Image (cartoon, coloured by chain):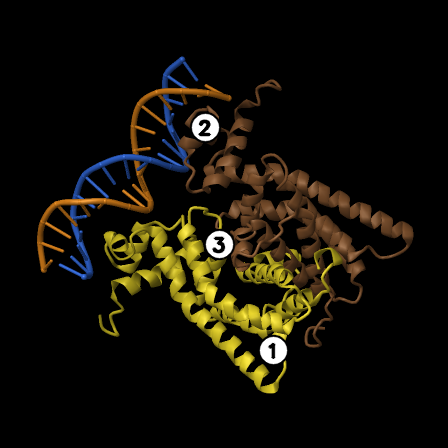
Chain colours: A yellow, B brown, C blue, D orange
Amino acid sequence: MTPLDPGTKTQILDVAERLFAEQGFAATSLRALTAAAGVNLAAVNYHFGTKEALLVAVFERRLRPLNERRLAGVDALMREADAAGRAPSLEGLLDTLFRPVLEMAGEPGGDSCAKLFARVHLETEAEALESMFLAQFCAVRDRIMPALLRALPDLPEHELIWRLHFAIGALAHTMQSTIRLQWLARGKAMTTDREATLRRLVGFCAAGMRAPASKEDR
Amino acid sequence: MTPLDPGTKTQILDVAERLFAEQGFAATSLRALTAAAGVNLAAVNYHFGTKEALLVAVFERRLRPLNERRLAGVDALMREADAAGRAPSLEGLLDTLFRPVLEMAGEPGGDSCAKLFARVHLETEAEALESMFLAQFCAVRDRIMPALLRALPDLPEHELIWRLHFAIGALAHTMQSTIRLQWLARGKAMTTDREATLRRLVGFCAAGMRAPASKEDR
DNA sequence: GTCTATACGATGATAGAC
DNA sequence: GTCTATCATCGTATAGAC
C-alpha cells in the first residue's frame, strides 16, 4: 500500500460512500460497487464482513474527525469562559455542535456522506449503525452537557435533555436535504449559504432552549 | 368483501404496517408478509405493483385522516381568531400541527405506523414515498403558512419557512424513537407522557420561531 | 494475509393457467 | 382475482491461488 495506491479497503470505502449517497444503500449492489472500485466481489466480505458493516465503516471514517472537532470546540469555549470567569455562550456551544456537520457537506466526498447521514433510519435492522453513532456521540454528549448546563443555569437538567433532543432534530432535518425546504418555500428562492443556515439554526435553537420552562415541568 | 372479511388488500395493508414497523422494510420479505396475511405471494404485486408501492400505500392510509385533522384544527383556530378580531395564537397553531402526529402513536396499529412515519422525514431513498408525503402535506402547508404569518407579523416569510423547517425536524426527531432521548439522558428517567412532550415541543418551537431575525437576514 | 472464482439459498417480480 | 411456476439478481460463504 503506497500513497499512490490507496489499497483495496480504502478504495471500497471511497466508492461505497459515493454510490450509497447517489443511489441509496439498498439500491447499490455489492456487484456494482466492487466493479466500480475495480476489486473482487468477495473483497467486501473479506475486509468488512457484511454490506451493513461496510456502511458502518463508511460513516465511522467521517464521524470520528467530526466529533474531534466538536470536542476541541467545546474545550476552547470552556477555557475562554473559565479564564473570563463567566459561563460559556449558548450560541457558541450550539455553533460548535452544528458547524462541523455543515462543514462536512462542503468537503470533497463529505457531501455524499452528509446525504447518507440522514437516510440511515428506515432500516430498523441497522442496529450496528445506531450503536456506532451513539458511541461516537458519547464523548460529545459528556462534554457539552455540563457546558450547556452552565450556559443555562436556570434550566432543569431533564428539560435541557429534551431541548437538546429537539435541537439535534432540527439539525438532522436541515442536513437531510434542501429538497423539502425548497418545497416548503413553494418555488420561492431560498439562500442555502452555509453561514446563513448556521446562523438561523443557532438562533432558532438558542431561543428555544432559553424559553422559560412551563410550570408543570419545573 | 363483507364487514367480517376485510378483503385481501386491507389484510395486506394491516399486516404490512405491523411487520414493516417491527422488522423494518428491507428485512420483511413478501413471502413472510403474505404468509402472515394468509394471501398468495403474487397478491401484493397484483394489488400494489411493487413492494415499495405497498409501503407508500401503508403510509397514505394513515396520513390522509391525520392531515384532515390538521386542516380542521387550523380552520377552527382561524375562525376563532377572526371572530375575536385578533391573530391566531402561535402555540395553538403549532399544537394543531404536532398533535395529530403524537396522537396517531396512541391509536391501535398507529403506534407501528408512527415509528415508520417518523422515519419518512429522514429518508429520501424511496422517491415515491417522498412525493406522496409532500403531496399529502401540501394542503396543510398552504393552510398553515398564512396563519403563521398572521401569528408572527414581524417575521419575513423566508425566515418563517426556515423556522418551520426546523420545527418539523424537531417533531420528526421526537417521533422517531425515544431510544436516542433515553440515551441522551444517560439512564436518567424521562417522562414520555404525550401531553408533556407536546407542551415541551410547542414551547421550544414557539420560542425559536419568535426569535428576532438576525440583521443579516432581515 | 490478500485476492479470486464459483456456488448457494433467498429475494422481488412476472407470465400464464384457472 | 387468485394461483403455481419460474426468472434474474441479490448478499453471503468457501475453497484455493498467489
- The CA span between labels 1 and 3 is 33 Å
Q: Tell whether label 1 touches label 2 (CB within 8 Å).
A: no
**Nearest to viewer (mark 1 / mark 3):** 1
**The C terminus of chain B lies in which quarter of the figure?**
bottom right
Q: Residue furthest bottom?
A: A83
x, y percent for residue B136: 64, 44
Callout 3 amino acid: Arg
The one nearer the camera, B176 or A162, is: A162
**Nearest to viewer (mark 2 / mark 1):** 1
Q: Label 1 neighbourhood size at 10 Å, few (<14), some (14-19), many (20+)? A: many
Q: Residue at x 62, y 57 (%)?
A: B170
x, y percent for residue B161: 68, 61
Q: Residue at x 55, y 23 (%)?
A: B7
The one nearer the camera, D18 or B47, is: D18
Q: Quadrant of residue C16?
A: top left
Q: Quadrant of residue B117?
A: top right
Query: What chain does mark 2 sit on?
Result: B
Residue B106 as seen in the image, left or right of residue B142: left
Query: What chain does mark 1 sit on?
Result: A
Callout 2 amino acid: Ala
Give the residue pinned by disc 2: B36
- The CA span between labels 2 and 1 is 56 Å
Say whether mark 3 and mark 1 are on the same chain. Answer: yes
- The CA span between labels 2 and 3 is 28 Å
The one nearer the camera, B145 or A62, is: A62
Give the residue pinned by disc 3: A119
Q: Residue at x 46, y 53 (%)?
A: A120
Q: Tell whether label 3 touches label 1 (CB within 8 Å).
A: no
